[in-house]
Amino acid sequence: MGSNMAEAHPVGFQWVMEAKARGARVIHIDPRFTRTSALADQHVTLRAGTDIAFLGGVINYILSHGLEFREYVRAYTNAPFLLSERYRDTEDLDGLFSGYDPATASYDASSWAYESIDVEERGGSRHKEQSAPYQHGAGGPSLDAGAGRIASDPTLEHPRCVFQVLKRHFARYTPEMVERICGVPRERFLEVCRAWTENSGRERTAALVYSVGWTQHSVGAQYIRAGSIIQLLLGNIGRPGGGIFALRGHASIQGSTDIPTLFNLLPGYLPMPDTTHEDLAGYLDSIRRPGQKGFWGNADAYTVSLLKEYWGEAATAENDYCFDYLPRINGDHGTYRTTMDMIDGKVFGYFLLGQNPAVGSAHGRLQRLAMANLDWLVVRDLTMIESATFWRDAPEIETGEIVPERCRTEVFFFPAASHVEKSGTFTQTQRMLQWRDQAVEPSGDQRSELWFFYHLGRLVKEKLAGSADERDRPVLDLAWDYRTEGDEPSADDVLRHINGIDLRSGRTVDGYAGLRADGTTACGCWIYSGVYADEVNQSRRRRPRFEQGPYEAEWGWTWPLNRRVLYNRASADPEGRPWSERKALVWWDEERGEWTGHDIPDFERTKPPGHRPPEGASGPQALAGDDAFIMMADGKAWLFAPSGLVDGPLPTHYEPHESPVRNLLHGQQGNPTRKVYGRPDNPSNPAPPEAHGEVFPFVVTTARLTEHHTAGGMSRQLPYLSELQPELFVEVSPELARERGLRHLDWAHVITSRTAVDARVVVTDRLAPLRVEDRVVHQVWLPYHWGPAGLVGGDVVNDLFGVVADPNVLIQESKVATCDIRSGRRPRGPALLRYVRDYRRRAGITAETGTRVMTAGGEHKPAHIEPDSPEESP
Amino acid sequence: MSLERWIGAWPVYRQLTGADRLGRGKAAESRRSAGLTPRTDTADRVVASVCPYCAVGCSQRVYVKGERVIQIEGNPDSPISRGRLCPKGSASKQLVTGPQREQKVLYRPPYGTAWQELDLNTAMDMVADRVLDARRRGWQDTDSAGNTLRRTMGIASLGGATLDNEENYLIKKLFTALGALQIENQARI
């Protein structure tokens, strides 16, 4: 779901086809019939943005038919735990959970806690602004009072136990409701339910794959939660052939999350400190609470070791290991917020490092106007991309909004070294680090990012040398003495420091268990610890697959500790025996007194299944022998999330920010905590209960093509790929083509309140009109790879989207919006601005449109608009 | 040429006497074809690499001759890709050797209408000066309540998902020391 794997990850898809050849059933659920659907056993068309309604229907099917894997659920999930009496569900509050504050559009999550845990009121607004759920990653956020004695009911009958709450929450997600919301005929939906449940259990497992078709939504994190709940109920997590796979779209996007270039994270999902963290102790207390279980309990060792790697000898116990050198966040500093701050003149300089926001980010016009209002811009890329040349070929040149002679931005373009001209690691989508050897030297001024930042750091340090200014100390004290080969820093040496070094012996540590909080180890990223165990670059291992077992443990290196299946302790029953011989992965070997199996056990190797922690234990020591989810604060997988999400402890179907229909389940239309940036330069199309939605009657969604790569910088410049996919097109159903007079291969243009985009028409039954409640909903689809540069050009499809974000992770909703489509080409030049303005006028759009995010009950419905934002769009 | 070799060069004879009875392979091969070798055979060295496009992580073999990349192919040893590459991965020789690759630092001054060339070291020095200037102008010691901020809001960065882990590590480390925290990448998009 939310993935066109055959198209976007074709080589990975060979494994799906291999499974199919061996008898697996492949189901593809997607708004459009794609290359993946063509190879699947079954394709189900659903309305874009309704996946939670569909998945909630599956959850309801499982629970109402008693099809859950009961022993697994009871042992490894929080299903038996009792919730606080203060908790109120969306079923009680018209689509809101308890704790909602309309003024800040955020939740105080304290009423979502387990019964036995008293929690303080939580700052929902702060967590939302800082994308707190992204922090700690998969690890799970803290529980306020540990997990020693959580009240529970192993029979799963207590009305306040998670299992029963889940049952009630999804009871109205019936096949009939799925049909009415998603446009999926109930029989087709039930076929999926039967296939999914019949292929799960002791003897069988089912895998779930998603991509940005799930993440790029205003409820994106909850889509994934909904999928995870199903996989947990069916016992498909931590087991061979099971799992939930995020197929990521870039060579090292997993790596750039693990070793983050993200505002709210430090390496290894440690949170970036905020203004509530006065010192190291306070910071650590916010990550791990006394009595809390799991490996976040050692966050002190991870943090101190990171600070030792950053500031070396300057970091001592006396000065809190330079904790105070870290800058503090206090709100949303995500890329879209920063873009708007550029427009508002608050940001002076911008680096773009292999990234092309003029094409690749939502609301491209906003991106380009932001770049046109900087003092300076540094672009580092292989080729000349639109983000480097906006001052002369942006669409805003044609409309007169950017005039080169009046654009003050100073632009530096640095040619980058390619992947064969430098060595280093990418982390691929299953957490595997693979080392690339350098093949040739780059030519001319081409340099690696490693070179650029190493020397930028060196220059900055030189320029600040001798400064007595306290704010320069973090730069002057920064450990920046990596080995170099010529003037190129050694990626191998950097990886060694990322792995971690025992400062007493000077040797690399073997894993994160070897990190200490006393300043005697330095480690750049604790979850990568072990990648350089035994002073060997483990990511460079390339033992051919022909010479290895099924888990190929000697190819590359997977974090954590080369474990290929996360939480694989759950592949065995609580007593440590495989759930079935057919699905054996790791198990307890009684004779040798250790965990063993085909994969490396994701569990303490010698902790027996029957182990019970001593009273008062915390951290890893508090994990029992059947606490399979070793990163979680209670050792259990969370069907219900008592903390950690800002938009609710359970997934709930909300309509997208821009939707043609009213939410059939609740008065609450959209995600009540979604991040709207209510500004005149970021208009929204109206959605029910707002009026005039009929001006933008259709649903638009976008995706990739095999032959191009995201914003096109690595594909539109290549003759082979440009020839294979030479032009932007829009797919429409024959019915919509008739309704709007669109002809195959003629021009049409798609319009939103942001802009209009030209594309060639492809009339195809890959898209089908859907019957939703009492009306027909048409969907249109476009690939988004084009821009003005390169061998093949076209309009920028991301210009159609505005900026509205999932509050957990601040990722924009760019997989669904509403639109109009008309035959012929769009107006050009200033006439385009007048054309789009006329659409906004007809739809009654103001800065407030779409920002009254609370629509449940009551009269108090504030708009969430930004004070002192700039003029309306021209 | 001996009679035997002369007859042996006749495709029909080879088709009738050899293993290729349908005449669609070896039997129909001309002398010229028989003498052809893959260009990869003449490479000076083969270097192990990884495809730079999506996140599947397909292994590549990079063939180098005369310090130039002459071919990039899939690596059959890989348990992930088993030697396969998609159209993008297969086109990656064009990605690294094509004429679209920029070679020079280019500079567009404020209000300029064309690029200018700039020496790399000069450009680095100019960027370092601008980083320090923007850092100073955007500096915030504390918030209105007196809490420590110790940061600059004058500098932002976007990118990293196509870069190496080692590179992202240095980027985050340097910017954090400078107090810059609007450091983002595709993972937010």
Image: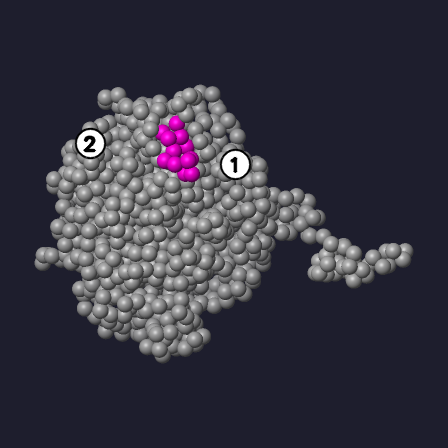
The percent coordinates of residue A719 (x first, y second) are 56, 62
Between label 2 and label 1, give the one nearer the viewer. Answer: 1
Residue A633 shown left or right of residue A245 in the figure: left
Q: Is residue A338 above or below residue A659?
A: above
Amino acid type, callout 2: Ile
Which chain does tag 2 point to? A
Which chain does tag 1 point to? A
The part of the image, by quadrant, that contains residue A229 is top left
Q: Are marks 2 and 1 in contact (CB under 8 Å)?
A: no
Q: Nearer the viewer, residue B124 or A452?
A: A452
Q: Is mark 1 on a helix, strand or loop?
A: loop
The percent coordinates of residue A154 (x first, y second) are 21, 34
Q: Name the residue under label 1.
A: A549
Which residue appears at 74% of the width and 60% of the height?
Answer: B28
Which residue appears at 73% of the width and 54% of the height?
Answer: B19
On residue A507, the disc is: none
